[in-house]
Amino acid sequence: MAASPLSKQKVFMGMINHDNRRTIEPFLGFELLLFRRFQQQPGLWYEWRTNLSRKASHGTVKDLEAACTSGDTALQTLESLEELGVGDIHQDLWFLSVMVHRRPKNLLEFVEMEIERERCKRLPKYGETLMMRYLNLYNFTVLSLDSMFKFGDDNRLPREIFRCPNVKSLSLKYNSLEYLPCDIGRMSKLEYLALTNNKLSVWSLPYSL
């Protein structure tokens, strides 16, 4: 009898696998929340990206990048952004502040590529979203998405994260998830799936696993 696809995967609902650690840079929760917000509010993305690009043309983005990597706190980084005039960041956009603080090079590189794509009038592929282009650019193999949602948040997982063909490790701990979408079956290379402290049962796991 042929083994099911799940038989070679490691699924954890109540424990942590200490034998499958990764040293590669993962895709983190604040990145998911940031790009989800930008997709919900395209005008916000366009305004912030345009302001940042305008500063880049005057060389001040290098100052921003230096400030972001100097060990400042996220709040200080937020203040630095406002001083540079790249767009006000409201407190409920804390994940934008964290993104600029933790991964300024990723964000700046992505902004530059998006502006160049539009300048050359290259249309995105059908159904391709902003988050999907970011995920494809960095070809993440590890998605570490623990504790992303506060109580009462919309904790539905975006389908984009299940369309990353090379993901080997997916951690979704402490997210109060009640079900997993069937799209998780697309992750053919998945080896490690952590689901500790969610509201899942065996019956809420999709058959596609």
Image (cartoon, rainbow, N blue to C red):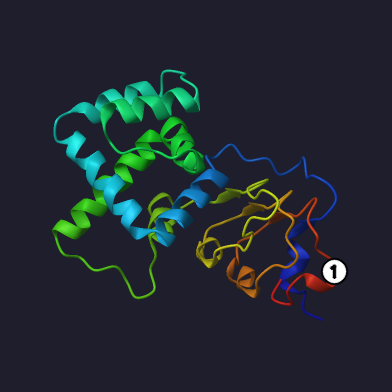
Q: Can residue 27 be seen in this view?
A: no
In the picture, measured across the screen, residue 134 lies left or right of residue 196, that is left
> Residue 141, relative to residue 206: is it above or below?
above
Asked whether residue 12 appears in the rendered view, the answer is: yes
- Is 124 placed above or below 25 here? below
> Residue under circle 1?
202
Vertically, is 114 above or below 92? below
Q: Quadrant of the N terminus?
A: bottom right
Q: Position of residue 106 (x, y in %)?
A: 38, 40
Which residue shows up at 39% across the image and 65% down it?
A: 129
How many numbered discs sit on the rendered protein?
A: 1
Q: Between 184 and 44, which is closer to the camera in this rendering?
A: 44
Q: 83 above or below 203?
A: above
Quarter containing the C terminus:
bottom right
In the displayed orientation, state which residue is furthest to the bottom.
Answer: 1
Residue type at mark 1: give it. Val
Is 85 placed left or right of 74 in the picture?
left
Crowdedness near tag 1: few (<14), some (14–19) or many (≥20) residues, C-alpha within 10 Å: few
Residue positioned 41% across, 23% down in the render? 69
Q: Which residue is drawn at 26% across and 32% down?
A: 85
- Where residue 184 appears, as percent x and y from the top left, is 63, 68
In front here: 90 or 26?
A: 90
List x then y, in percent, for residue 21.
68, 40
Measuring from the top left, give residue 70's x and y in whole percent.
Answer: 41, 18
Q: Nearer the viewer, residue 43 or 15?
A: 43
As helix, strand or loop, the secondary structure at mark 1 comes to: helix
